Image (cartoon, rainbow, N blue to C red):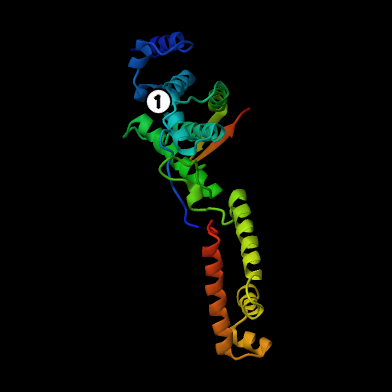
Amino acid sequence: MTQKKLSNRKSQTLTKKPTKMEQQIEDSELVRDYISGDEKSLEILITRHNQRITSFIYSKVLDRDITEDIFQDTFIKVIKTLKKGTYSEEGKFLPWVMRIAHNLIIDHFRKNKRMPKFEGNDDFNIFSVIGDDKLNAEKQIIKNQIDSDLRGLIEELPDDQKEVLLMRIYKDMSFKEISENTGVSINTALGRMRYALINLRKIIEKNNIVLTN
Amino acid sequence: MEKIYSEHKDECTLVRSGRNTIGFLLNYSQSLHVVAYKDLKFENNLN
């Protein structure tokens, strides 16, 4: 087939969907034509492999704009290599282009030092790993309610027990410090704390109070 | 925090690059001339 005939065939098929005739022209033949100066061949090559290469890039980067950028850079490399005449006919054209695209995708992620956008699915939810320690509004209200109920119950205790319990739990003092502050021995303080807890449990049981979240 | 390289499951969308991108590439291809001098190759972009 002469060069002229081939060019005519190509120009007929460019504007519409690739016809059978166009599909028959091998990639390697188009690459040869392009190297020898036929710009139309490049258009056929790009149009023919557009979807496969673009979809491949998109499946990795998940962003339309970045996909087009990488697609463009890929073909700039292809054009440069072909025009410089450093393309070797050893492999096939498409795998070679895919490899270039693949390397550019890796470069993109290295350069940006960030991972693809993460979206949780049913199997794994990102928020189970990076959860917020704070309680949600409902649980916070329940917790406040329990705290205030407990305060009320503590008020029911005898003064000496209440004093020790407040110092131990709310002021976070040691029994040594409590004994120094109240002027009683450590053992007495320990005993009062024990009785304070026993009495609290008794009050709770007696009144059927539920103090759980 | 550990890095999570989870892949998106159902990502097989077929997409195509736009006309502008292809147009740019074809123009770029037409404007690029490589001049060889001895062992060196120079790229000229004649816009």
Q: How many marks?
A: 1
Outermost front residue: A206
Image: A56 above or below A190: above
Quarter of the rendering containing residue A140: bottom right
Label 1: few (<14), some (14–19) or many (≥20) C-alpha neighbours in 10 Å: some
The residue drawn where x is 41% and y is 30% is B12
Residue A30's x, y, as percent? 39, 22
Is A30 situated above or below A62? Answer: above
Measured as percent of width and height from the top left, residue A193 is found at 57, 79
A84 or A57: nearer the eye?
A: A57
**In the depicted view, which residue is nearer to us: B18 or A24?**
B18
Name the chain letter of the residue that bears numbered label 1.
Answer: A
Image point 44% across, 38% down: which residue?
B8
Left or right of A79 in this view: A145: right
Quadrant location of the N terminus of chain A in the rendered image: top left
Where is residue A213, by image quadrant? Answer: bottom right
Q: Kindly identify which residue carries mark 1.
A: A31
Residue B11 in the image, given as x and y percentages of width and height: 43, 33
Element at label 1: helix
The residue shown at (47%, 26%) is: B15
In-image side of A15 versus A181 (left or right): left
Q: Amino acid at mark 1?
A: Val
Between A106 and A171, the one lying in front of the other is A171
Eyeballing the image, is A162 above or below B42? below
Q: Position of residue B10 (x, y in %)?
A: 41, 33
B40 or A139, nearer to the observer: A139
For residue B27, which quarter of the picture? top right
Say whether residue A15 is visible.
yes
